[in-house]
Image (cartoon, grey):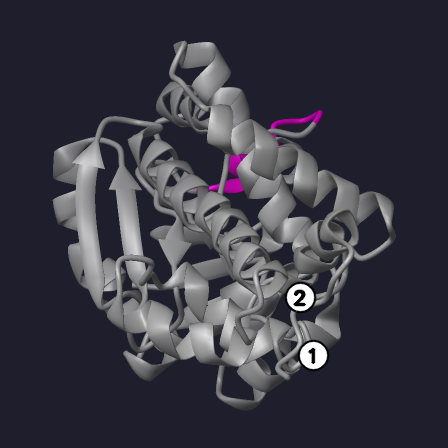
Amino acid sequence: MRQAFIGVGTMGSLMAGCLLDAGVDLAVYDIRREAAEPLLQRGAQWADGAESAVDGCGIVWTSLPGPTQVESVLLGNEGGVLSAMAEGATLVDTTTNDPDVARRVSTACAERGLTMLDAPVSGRPPTMTMMVGGQRDVFEGVRNSLDAVAAQVFYVGPAGAGCVAKLATQYMGYTNLIAAIEGMLIARMGGVDPAVLAEIVPVSAGASRAFNAIPNSILNRNFEAGGTLDIVAKDVALACALAERLGAPAGTGSIADARYKQAQAEGWGDEGYPIVARVLEALAGVELRPR
């Protein structure tokens, strides 16, 4: 079955590559053709536009920057990509998206005789995790393709549920990072070498995956990471907005949201997200450098 992948940037290219590894006949499109070149060299076919990419495809994948782009690309003024998809095809949107937008797209798909799964991902191959919302029978029908992309695939509920699960995990991870940086600053200001504390935390109550950014990116001052500050700030803001709509407590997230936005205001949006540490260091008047 021919498939299409629209949006082959950092994450999209990894997922599209997994599909090629599985032998999928794959058409690809991105607003930057150069982003697709490594995939084209591996056998993917280039499409001149998003609508032409989906022609005759049974499964259409999308990996887009956020809710605005999802609505623009998939719905558009003239129906967008959905209007070009073959009846009976399935859309798998891997964007970290607003659940309400995912539900609107799902409804639009149903009106056109299409099906849709919201399937945001976490991590990278070969250990990528996928959280899927949509109809259970649709999920089971394309399960082989989902398994080709992610090592762990979880069905979490109806349309929008995949996005809810992803935003909840993003909320946990990136608010945790802010708390971890604050803890490190407390220790630093109290006279403890940050390098020593960085060895203690992984074998103590403070251990977490989010903490790894501190010894790997902050103490060595390179602030490198798998995602940019802009991406993380977008996800935290979406999670906080969801919490507000649901009436869920999100005090910790509101503080983290403000810190990430402050870092963006400093012009660091394209830097690795651990650069948010510089905002907290400025408040503390010290830097997290090993002695």
Number of residues whose C-alpha sits closer than 10 Å to that of mark 1, classed few (under 14), some (14–19) or many (20 or more): few
Query: Which quarter of the image is occupied by the N terminus?
Result: bottom left
Residue occupying image coordinates x 26% and y 58%: 205
Q: Residue at x 24, y 26 (%)?
A: 158
Q: Is residue 78 in the magenta section? A: yes
Which residue lies at the image location 64% right of the left edge and 84% below the top edge? 291
Within 10 Å of the Cα at label 2, are there few (<14), some (14-19), or many (20+) other Cα atoms? many
The residue labelled by disc 1 is 222
Q: What is the quadrant of residue 123 in the picture?
A: bottom left
The residue lying toward the viewer, choosing from 207 and 175, is: 207
Compared to residue 257, the image places residue 286 above or below, namely: below
Residue 206: percent from left, percent from top: 33, 58
Mark 1: secondary structure:
loop
Query: Where is residue 23 drawn, in percent x and y?
Result: 30, 80
Q: Quadrant of residue 211?
A: bottom left
CB atoms of marks 1 and 2 within 8 Å: yes
Q: Is residue 164 magenta?
A: no
User: Cα distance, mark 1 to mark 2?
Assistant: 9 Å
The range drawn in magenta is 77-85
- Can you see residue 189? yes
258, above or below 205, in the image: above
Secondary structure beneath dot 2 equals loop
How many numbered circles does the render carry?
A: 2
Determine if residue 70 is in view. Answer: no
Q: Which residue is mark 2?
A: 272
Q: Which numbered dot is residue 254?
A: none
